[in-house]
């Protein structure tokens, strides 16, 4: 059912030029202040074979879109370009790119052969210094993986220009939604981070909720009503086989999430009126109860080092965020602002926690330090919820639902600075995103 | 479930065939008032809303749902009255099982609303058990905010969505 991405990606450095040691490399600093996007130019990549022509235009377009999408870069339109790049090996006419104020220049070439193998090579230039930034590289894949090649190139450019780890070559698993609010049909789906290549993992015969990628992206945990009760399922992305993970029949289990090493799952289990957090060893199925109070404890998320768990509890009377040791124990409350806090997710860098906040009839996605300080709300709307971190911890994706009888869901992303809020294009309504690892 | 549906339809069809009494509508009210009235002889269509042993009667006359205040799972006096009727019906019609479905309005996060719906459904279940309904005949499930019946984003709709619905399952017919 799912077409498995069969590309072989090969990366190697094009060591044609000696590595240049620039004292002040071209760099855009990602800070809290307002950022003036760095102007860059991406001339259409050179097609080095006739088969390569069909990919050259689209591939260079995706590279540019990835960079523009960060809000950190501004593309200089191609019709403003003075130089035409007709050969990958030709010397760069820096004066022509300076004249249109392109600070960064990305040149590339694409070749493809009859067997369907696509190869892209690229270089990044610091126009005003007149030097190459890093070294040229090339990536290869089968033809159906051409978008990944573009994301790989853009990831390299992003890393070189920001000094940050990248996130474009990643996927998102989410819930695709169709139909009105009172007859909503939900299906599990997976897509590239930018909304391309959507594939469905389940049909809409039962409610599915809140999928979560494993740290290596090979498995997905989700909650399904397939048996009539909400229960946790685990799905292998490769062959789309799923099985029930939590085995107590007629007992509700939900809100699962993997441990950083993928061996454990933390989740909520409801017994009577009480919902607590449990942990399960995936291989053995052995379970352990981590919370035991009469309150609702749910939405657990591990710290990246695996030693702690952040979760929400209404033990104080309203939903608030707490941190406890990974083996269970007393929770320490970290949220103290106005309103309710839920769905905490630990950042991949370990320094921040993203959450959903509900206050005065509005919903917000926010971030705070792990001790609860420096709370910052990134969004505000009728209903925002369920943040998930980009692999580099710089961007958050979440669900937004609009108000009223025609209310519909969509995915949005926002920088952790609160800038660059934008909708992620999906073919239908969408909710509950989980951002997978860099591939 | 298919078997159950067929069986119910069959019973309903037999009932229709037996309904030759021209005064059946007059008698239906009398039948409905009797605590244990039932069957074609009582003058109403068995399985219809006038048949006190029917699930339609349970849903519409007894009342299959109770409503909750925002973020609450405590039972109001009105809710207790409805549940008293539900308990009475379940004790009288002892062949039936019931699944109590808990729901929340859309103003909340998904996971929390699942747990909140469970709290509400469990409140109902505990109340029914306290009135003598064997817990072996009851189950509960939460749909959180996944199954609203009203779709506007105003309190008039939210109030109806914050509910626990007792769904009768015809276990006696499936054997």
Image: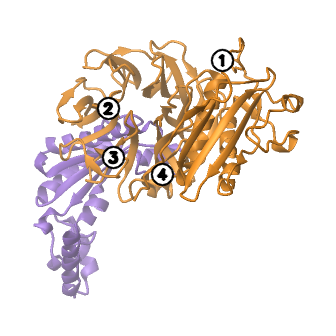
Chain colours: A orange, B purple
Label 2, secondary structure: give it. loop
Asked if marks 1 and 3 fall on the same chain, the answer is yes
Closer to us: B16 or A8:
A8
Residue shown at 32%/44% (left/top)?
A: B78
Q: Earlier in the sequence, mark 4 or mark 1?
A: 1
Chain letter belonging to callout 2: A
Which residue is the site of mark 2? Answer: A262
Q: Position of residue A127 (x, y in %)?
A: 79, 26
Task: Measure the C-alpha gap from mark 1 to mark 3.
Answer: 38 Å
Chain letter belonging to callout 4: A
Q: Position of residue A16 (x, y in %)?
A: 66, 30
Residue shown at 49%/25% (left/top)?
A: A354
Residue shown at 41%/22% (left/top)?
A: A320
Q: Nearer the viewer, mark 4 or mark 1?
A: 1
Which residue is the site of mark 1? Answer: A31
Quarter-wise, where is residue B71 in the image?
top left
Q: Earlier in the sequence, mark 1 or mark 3?
A: 1
Q: Residues within 10 Å of mark 1 (few under 14, many from 20)?
A: few
Chain letter belonging to callout 1: A
Which residue is the site of mark 4? Answer: A176
A274 on left or right of A347: left
Q: Residues within 10 Å of mark 2 (few under 14, many from 20)?
A: some
Q: Is residue B19 above or below residue A388?
A: below
Q: Is residue A55 above or below residue A291?
A: below
Q: Earlier in the sequence, mark 4 or mark 2?
A: 4
Q: Position of residue A157 (x, y in %)?
A: 65, 31
């Amino acid at each position: 059912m799912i077409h498995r991405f069969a590309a072989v990606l090969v990366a190697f450095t094009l060591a044609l030029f000696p590595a240049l040691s620039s004292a002040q490399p071209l760099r855009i600093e990602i800070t809290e202040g307002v950022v003036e996007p760095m102007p860059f130019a991406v001339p259409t990549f050179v097609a080095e074979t006739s088969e390569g022509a069909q990919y050259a235009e689209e591939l260079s377009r995706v590279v540019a879109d990835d960079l523009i999408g960060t809000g950190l870069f501004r593309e200089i339109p191609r019709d403003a370009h003075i130089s035409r790049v007709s050969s990958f090996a030709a010397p760069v006419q820096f004066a022509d790119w300076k004249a249109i104020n392109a600070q960064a220049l990305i040149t590339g070439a694409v070749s493809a052969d009859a067997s369907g193998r696509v190869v892209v090579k690229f270089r990044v230039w610091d126009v005003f210094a007149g030097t190459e930034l890093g070294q040229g590289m090339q990536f290869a894949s089968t033809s159906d993986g051409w978008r990944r090649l573009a994301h790989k190139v853009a990831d390299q450019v992003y890393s070189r220009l920001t000094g940050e780890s990248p996130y474009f070559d990643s996927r998102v698993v989410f819930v695709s939604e169709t139909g009105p609010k009172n007859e909503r049909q939900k299906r599990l789906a997976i897509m590239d981070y930018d909304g391309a290549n959507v594939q469905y993992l389940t049909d809409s015969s039962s409610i599915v909720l809140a999928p979560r990628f494993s740290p290596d992206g090979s498995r997905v945990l989700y909650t399904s009503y397939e048996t009539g009760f909400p229960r946790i399922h685990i799905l292998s992305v490769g062959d789309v086989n799923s099985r029930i993970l939590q085995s107590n029949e007629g007992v509700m289990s939900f809100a699962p999430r993997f441990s950083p090493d993928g061996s454990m799952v933390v989740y909520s289990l409801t017994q009577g009126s009480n919902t607590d957090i449990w942990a399960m060893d995936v291989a053995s199925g052995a379970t352990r109860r981590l919370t035991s109070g009469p309150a609702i404890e749910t939405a657990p998320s591990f710290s990246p080092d695996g030693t702690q768990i952040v979760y929400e509890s209404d033990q104080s009377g309203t939903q608030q965020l707490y941190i406890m040791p990974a083996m269970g124990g007393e929770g320490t409350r970290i949220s103290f602002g106005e309103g309710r806090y839920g769905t905490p997710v630990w950042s991949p860098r370990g320094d921040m926690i993203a959450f959903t906040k509900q206050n005065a009839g509005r919903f917000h996605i926010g971030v705070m330090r792990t001790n609860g300080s420096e709370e910052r709300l990134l969004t505000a709307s009728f209903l925002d919820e369920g943040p998930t971190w980009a692999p580099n911890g710089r961007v958050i994706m979440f669900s937004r639902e609009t108000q009223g009888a025609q209310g519909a869901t969509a995915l949005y992303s926002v920088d952790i600075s609160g800038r660059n809020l934008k909708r992620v294009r999906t073919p239908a309504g969408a909710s509950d995103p989980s951002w997978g690892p860099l591939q | 479930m298919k078997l159950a549906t067929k069986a119910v339809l069959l019973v309903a069809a037999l009932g229709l065939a037996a309904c030759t009494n021209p005064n059946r509508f007059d008698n239906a009210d009398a039948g409905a008032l009797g605590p244990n009235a039932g069957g074609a002889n009582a003058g109403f269509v068995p399985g219809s809303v006038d048949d006190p042993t029917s699930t339609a009667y349970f849903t519409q006359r007894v009342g299959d749902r109770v409503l909750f205040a925002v973020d609450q799972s405590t039972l109001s006096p009105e809710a207790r009255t409805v549940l008293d009727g539900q308990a009475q019906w379940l004790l009288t019609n002892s062949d039936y099982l019931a699944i109590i479905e808990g729901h929340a309005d859309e103003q909340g996060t998904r996971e929390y609303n699942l747990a909140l719906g469970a709290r509400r459904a469990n409140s109902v279940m505990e109340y029914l058990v306290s009135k003598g309904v064997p817990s072996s005949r009851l189950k509960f499930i939460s749909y959180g905010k996944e199954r609203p019946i009203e779709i506007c984003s105003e309190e008039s709709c939210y109030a109806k969505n914050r509910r626990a619905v007792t769904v009768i399952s015809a276990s006696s017919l499936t054997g």
